[in-house]
Amino acid sequence: MIPFNVPPVVGTETKYIQKAIENHKISGDGEFTKKCTEWLEEKYNPSKALLTTSGTSALEMAAILCEIKPGDEVILPSFTFCSTANCFVQRGATLVFVDVRKDTMNIDEKKIEKAITPKTKVICVVHYAGVACEMDEIMEIARKHRILVVEDAAQAICSSYKGRPLGTIGDFGCLSFHETKNFSMGEGGAIIINHDKDFNMAEIIREKGTDRSLFFRGIVDKYTWREYGSSYLPSDMNAAYLWAQLEQADKLQNFRMSVWKKYDDSFKEIAKAGKVVLPFVPAECVHNAHMYYLITKNFSERTELIKFLKEREISAVFHYIPLHSAPAGIKFGRFDGKDEVTTEYSERLVRLPFYYGLSESDQNKVIEAVLDFYSKP
């Protein structure tokens, strides 16, 4: 069976984990946490970055930094993972879901302003498949209404919009280093902080609500409990695993891009024939080859395609069940306007095997199987 995903491995992970153990510093903020942070801050300059235990915890930190309170409303797409919503629900907010665009599966910027009420505190955008939302228009709306913007860039490391790295355009950006992402530390993430005024508080929240980071830098002579916080600081062993990949980031990204392009070139004919819809990348966006998906004719065809691929020993999967239709989504939120795209397209989307190290022969098997399926009368 060709798996849908294999976590990235470049070969130096074990060596670096062993070094973290030998350093007698396996908790957070050791040598490898610092190396990863420096890499991120160079990539996201002049923003600041903090490594976290997950993309989810980065989002939770963002919600706290946005000072979300019970009764506040947060606008977000329904086509996303539950972590995007949970972080705000945890703070007592009401979720206001809006529809997505057909071309990118990103939040439809044309439908955001209508969803704004006096209670709206945050717009949370999700850069699906590493392709940017229409950030200029979204930021214009947010600033007009004095609303904060959180970028869920879990899938979007190394992606950009008009030359700006995703995660640096809103007030906060949230990355993921889960095993399914371009670079992995098993479970992990990072928060990108785009205003200097928020950095000290972010450090306090990340260190259980204490000013421990300031103490270690010699700024205070003792540390104490300052604010609400939690344990959002990852182990240095996890950071060691991640550092091995960040060190070879270009190699991993070049490989992923070559696979993405091969898929895309191979399926252009069936797309021209109207049999499938391929991923769309707007001209102002640079994507990161996070995934490759097809939009099938309907739900039934998607089911048949996944079954056909499984019979060929190829694992393909669908993606999110829209949050507004889930029990928790109904409990904690509402859908603003009409659901014209979200549900229909979520039922048509299928993701193909895609990971660093996917062999050329397996790439060819996937391509051949998809083309065989669509060659049937």
Image (tube, helix red, strand yellow):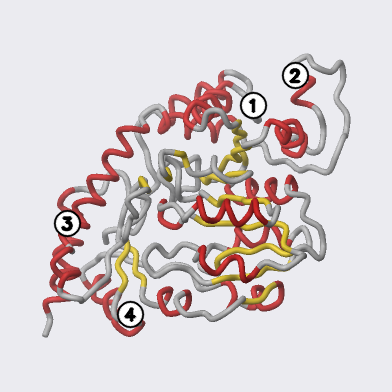
Element type at marker 1?
loop
- Is the C-beta separation of discs 2 and 4 under 8 Å? no
Res 182 → quadrant = top left
Q: Amino acid at mark 4?
A: Thr
Q: Earlier in the sequence, mark 3 or mark 4?
A: 3
Horizontal and vertical percent position of residue 58: 63, 45
Disc 4 designates what residue? 303
Q: Earlier in the sequence, mark 2 or mark 4?
A: 2
Q: CA distance from mark 1 to mark 3?
A: 43 Å
Element type at marker 3?
helix
Q: Amino acid at mark 1?
A: Asp
Q: CA distance from mark 1 to mark 4?
A: 46 Å
Q: Nearer the viewer, residue 243 or 111?
A: 111
Horizontal and vertical percent position of residue 117: 72, 68
Q: Earlier in the sequence, mark 1 or mark 4?
A: 1
Sort mark 3 into few (<14), some (14-19) or many (20+) by Cα contacts within 10 Å.
few
Disc 2 designates what residue? 216
Q: CA distance from mark 1 to mark 2?
A: 10 Å
Disc 3 designates what residue? 265
Res 48 → quadrant = top right
- Is the C-beta separation of discs 1 and 2 under 8 Å? yes
Disc 1 designates what residue? 29
Horizontal and vertical percent position of residue 327: 64, 78
